[in-house]
């Protein structure tokens, strides 16, 4: 089934002389790696592509965006400027995450291809356009899917594309340690290493290049750490005042939700963030592998209760409410699942 979806999507993409490539807002390494690699792949095949981000890339991923020529979403009314033959949407099936381009995507008759690996998804199909979906929730990363797609199609990679794909695989799997990692993930990474990617260099760029502000923000978050349900649930909070004290920005909070999982008893970790003081609280969920803790807590189902989604072990949502109100609602939902 996946082979057929790859083939149909590949045939469609190869017909487009100029492709618009988009991903979700607040982009992570997998999102930036996806669109950067696909831009390079398409250009190497002699066609044109514009890869756009709705927000500036976090500092740790800037080298990928710069090497691959990723740009910012055009702000002209009505959407992007220039004639495109199709739209390639990567690493999301959520209208909320595509909101800056939502009106454009709903109204344009351009054909669309969506490649995603998340469990939860919206129907992005527009009745007036051709549409192909390549979806595999068992894939550890969207970059892993892109790597499989390009190998099936015989598409070539240059150095920038190889590093972009490796970065996406590495960051979406916590440097290949999350439960989603399987043999095909490691084989794909090994293939990129054999082609010239240097793991030590990539690790230094991705995990050892943080700003001091991130460590100050981590201290702020850890100061709020609460343990509930017999120390099986960890909750941390980040307010706008904490970001200001740390001199930090929202991208600096990436992966902080994983820190409480260093506590052996913790099964579910939650990070609540109101970075902009806008009344919209970002909720990040993480859960431990059932092979480790004996409980299978699907946090994508928890996130769905709050209008979000993601993966079984990593998910998120945005809730319009005060941070304290969201804290109480989330704690109640997590406790109910753990007690069931």
Image: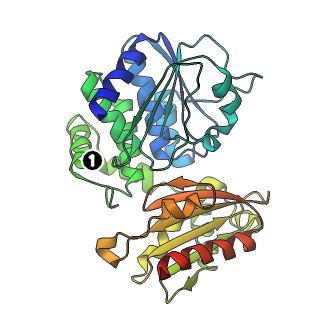
Query: Which residue is under mark 1?
Result: 185
Residue sitting nearer the eye, 249 or 311: 311
Which quadrant of the view contains residue 84? top right
Horizontally, residue 54 falls left or right of residue 150, namely right
Horizontally, residue 10 falls left or right of residue 52, namely left
> In this picture, is 295 found above or below 286?
below
Query: What residue sits 39% from the left and 82% below the top?
Result: 264
Query: What residue sits 51% from the left and 31% below the top?
Result: 89
x then y, percent, for residue 78: 74, 21
> In this picture, is 258 found above or below 262?
above
Query: What residue sits 49% from the left and 82% below the top?
Result: 339
> In this picture, is 276 found above or below 339?
above
x then y, percent, for residue 304: 57, 58
Identify the element where label 1 is drawn.
helix
Looking at the rendered image, the quarter that the N terminus falls into is top left
Horizontally, residue 86 falls left or right of residue 332, namely left
x then y, percent, for residue 281: 70, 61
Residue sitting nearer the eye, 318 or 301: 301
Residue sitting nearer the eye, 219 or 263: 263
């Amino acid at each position: 089934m996946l082979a057929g979806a790859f083939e149909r999507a590949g045939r469609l993409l190869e017909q487009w002389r100029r492709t618009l490539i988009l991903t979700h807002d607040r982009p992570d390494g997998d999102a930036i790696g996806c669109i950067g690699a696909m831009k390079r792949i398409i250009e190497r095949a002699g066609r044109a592509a514009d890869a756009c981000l709705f927000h500036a890339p976090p500092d740790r991923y800037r080298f990928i965006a710069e090497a691959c020529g990723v740009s910012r979403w055009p702000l002209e009314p009505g959407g992007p400027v220039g004639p495109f033959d199709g739209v390639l949407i990567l690493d999301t099936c959520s209208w909320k995450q595509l909101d800056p381009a939502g009106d454009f995507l709903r109204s344009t008759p351009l054909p669309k291809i969506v490649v995603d690996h998340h469990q939860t998804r919206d129907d992005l199909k527009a009745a007036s356009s051709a549409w192909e979906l390549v979806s595999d929730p068992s894939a550890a990363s969207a970059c892993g899917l892109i790597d499989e797609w390009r190998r099936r199609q015989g598409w070539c990679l240059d150095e920038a594309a190889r590093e972009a794909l490796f970065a996406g695989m590495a960051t979406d799997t916590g440097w290949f340690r999350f439960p989603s990692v399987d043999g095909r993930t490691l084989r794909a990474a090994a293939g990129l290493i054999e082609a010239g990617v240097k793991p030590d260099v990539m690790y230094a760029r991705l995990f050892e290049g943080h700003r001091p502000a991130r460590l100050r923000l981590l201290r702020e978050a850890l100061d709020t750490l609460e343990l509930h349900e017999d120390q099986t649930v960890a909750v941390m909070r980040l307010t706008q005042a904490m970001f200001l004290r740390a001199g930090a920005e929202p991208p600096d909070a990436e992966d902080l939700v994983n820190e409480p999982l260093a506590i052996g008893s913790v099964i579910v970790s939650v990070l609540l963030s109101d970075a902009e003081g806008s009344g919209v609280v970002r909720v990040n969920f993480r859960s431990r592998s059932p092979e480790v803790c004996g409980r299978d807590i699907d946090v994508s189902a928890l996130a769905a209760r709050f209008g979000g989604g993601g993966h079984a072990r990593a998910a998120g949502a945005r809730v319009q409410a005060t941070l304290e109100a969201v804290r109480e609602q989330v704690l109640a939902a997590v406790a109910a699942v753990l007690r069931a």
